[in-house]
Amino acid sequence: QELGLKRSFTRAACWWGARWTTTGAQTQLEFSAAPRMTTICGPADLTFWRQSGLSIEALPPHDHLTLEWRKALTNLTLNGLMTLHRAPNGALLKNSDWIAQARVLHLEARAVASALAVHLDPEASTWKEVLDTAQNTSENRNSLLQDLEAGRAWELPWLNEWLLETARGLQISLPQNTALVQSLKLNLK
């Protein structure tokens, strides 16, 4: 509200990967070659964003919670599991056991969103976003894994542990997510 200006926020979720690569002394940001779908929720100049070369999905401002959960479902499903296996996102698609585990992680996280009265697209749609992200960022090592490998503080407390804490408050059991967090803490320090 500074200077009498009304503030508004636009949320954006990127469904494509980026990673830092180093060749010799040069470090650069490399983007996945897949379609660069970005979902925007809130006030935005869509002409500007579309001219940037991104594929833009625009949601109404009141759908910000839906967007946040859509993105979180993908991260909750992929990041911890692929970090546990120290594998890039695309490895999920080559292992039927990991796919089955990911599906349960996804369904458990959706149960929490549902209990919080978050409106989500049908499960098949959010599951497809997980699989599309794994495909479109197949060579990427997710942010949780990158943090672990670099010795940085990792996002586990704000991602998977947050989900478990929220579920406990709602009296929802998340056995697959609980086992994943326990495995991560025991095996990856």
Image (cartoon, rainbow, N blue to C red):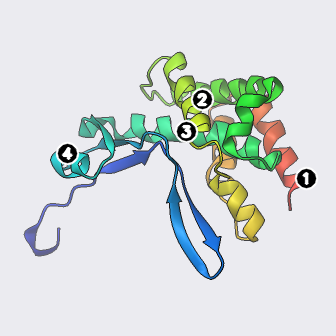
Query: Left or right: 45 with respect to 28?
Result: left
Q: Secondary structure at mark 4?
A: helix
| Quadrant of the rendering where the N terminus is positioned | bottom left
Q: Can you see residue 1?
A: yes
Q: Amino acid at mark 4?
A: Leu
- Identify residue for label 4: 46
How far apart, in angstroms, are the residues tagged by discs 2 and 1? 27 Å
> In the rendered view, does 180 fall on the left or right side of 142?
right
Give the residue furthest to the left: 4
Mark 4 and mark 3: Cα distance apart in space: 23 Å
Point 69% across, 61% down: residue: 146
Q: Amino acid at mark 1?
A: Leu
Seen in the picture, residue 117 relative to 58 is either above or below; the reply is above
Counting from the top left corner in percent of width and height, residue 106 is at 64, 28
The answer to which of 54 and 11 lies nearer the viewer is: 54
Query: Mark on residue 66?
Result: none
Q: Secondary structure at mark 1?
A: helix
Q: Look at the numbered disc 2 and give the secondary structure of its residue.
A: helix
Name the foreground residue: 69 vs 141: 141
Residue drawn at the location 70% of the way across and 68% of the way down = 153
Residue 21 sits in quarter: bottom right
Q: Name the N-terminal-most of marks 3 and 2.
A: 2
Residue 174 visible in the picture: no
Q: Which residue is mark 1?
A: 186
Identify the mark at residue 136; answer none if there is no mark.
3
2 and 4 marks in contact (CB < 8 Å): no
Q: Which residue is mark 2?
A: 131
N-term-proximal mark, 3 vs 1:
3
